[in-house]
């Protein structure tokens, strides 16, 4: 079923799931750099995975890399324009950088 939806083979799907599981463990241990490495690998396996970019953005946000987080959230939004939480979190990161015009764009855009 997932192969039909994603176009990926079963081995690749299982690898991506493994990277997500390891990432959860790394975040629970506050090992954010290793969590980013897991997302990097998941994105390498499936560069159209909006959730991977979004999740990597959340980790960068926790590391206070707000510019990096914005880049990740924007990539997630490019891949899935209706990804409301990516818009919201992108706006939060822009707020941290005092980019209030950008913040408004992210908050208003999903409403259109």
Image: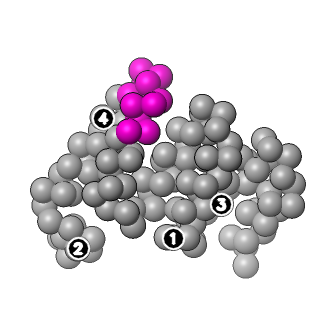
To which residue does mark 3 refer? 87
Instruction: Kindly report the distance in space between the C-alpha atoms of the residues bearing marks 3 and 4.
Output: 26 Å
Mark sitting on residue 80: 1
**Which of the two labelled residues, at mark 4 and mark 1, occupies the earlier sequence position?**
4
**Element class at badge 2:** loop
**Which of the two labelled residues, at mark 3 and mark 4, occupies the earlier sequence position?**
4
Q: Residue at x 47, y 22 (%)?
A: 30
Place of residue 15 in the rendered image (x, y in percent of width and height, measured from the top left): 20, 49
Confirm or deny contact between disc 2 and disc 4 (CB under 8 A).
no
**Element class at badge 1:** loop
Instruction: Kindly report the distance in space between the C-alpha atoms of the residues bearing marks 4 and 1.
Output: 24 Å
Mark sitting on residue 7: 2
Q: Which residues are magenta?
A: 26-37
Res 89 visible? no
Indicate left or right for 42 with 35 as reference: left
Confirm or deny contact between disc 2 and disc 1 (CB under 8 A).
no
Instruction: Kindly report the distance in space between the C-alpha atoms of the residues bearing marks 2 and 1.
Output: 17 Å
Magenta stretch contains residue 31: yes
Instruction: Kindly report the distance in space between the C-alpha atoms of the residues bearing marks 2 and 4.
Output: 23 Å
To which residue does mark 4 refer? 22
Confirm or deny contact between disc 3 and disc 2 (CB under 8 A).
no
């Amino acid at each position: 079923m997932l192969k039909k939806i994603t176009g990926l083979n079963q081995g690749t799907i299982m690898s991506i799931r493994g990277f997500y599981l390891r990432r959860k463990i790394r975040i629970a241990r506050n090992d954010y750099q290793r969590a980013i490495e897991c997302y990097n690998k998941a994105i390498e396996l499936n560069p159209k995975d909006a959730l991977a970019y979004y999740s990597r953005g959340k980790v960068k946000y926790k590391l206070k890399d707000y510019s990096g987080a914005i880049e990740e959230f924007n990539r997630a939004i490019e891949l899935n324009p209706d990804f409301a939480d990516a818009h919201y979190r992108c706006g939060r990161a822009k707020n941290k950088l005092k980019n209030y015009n950008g913040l408004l764009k992210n908050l208003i855009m999903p409403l259109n």
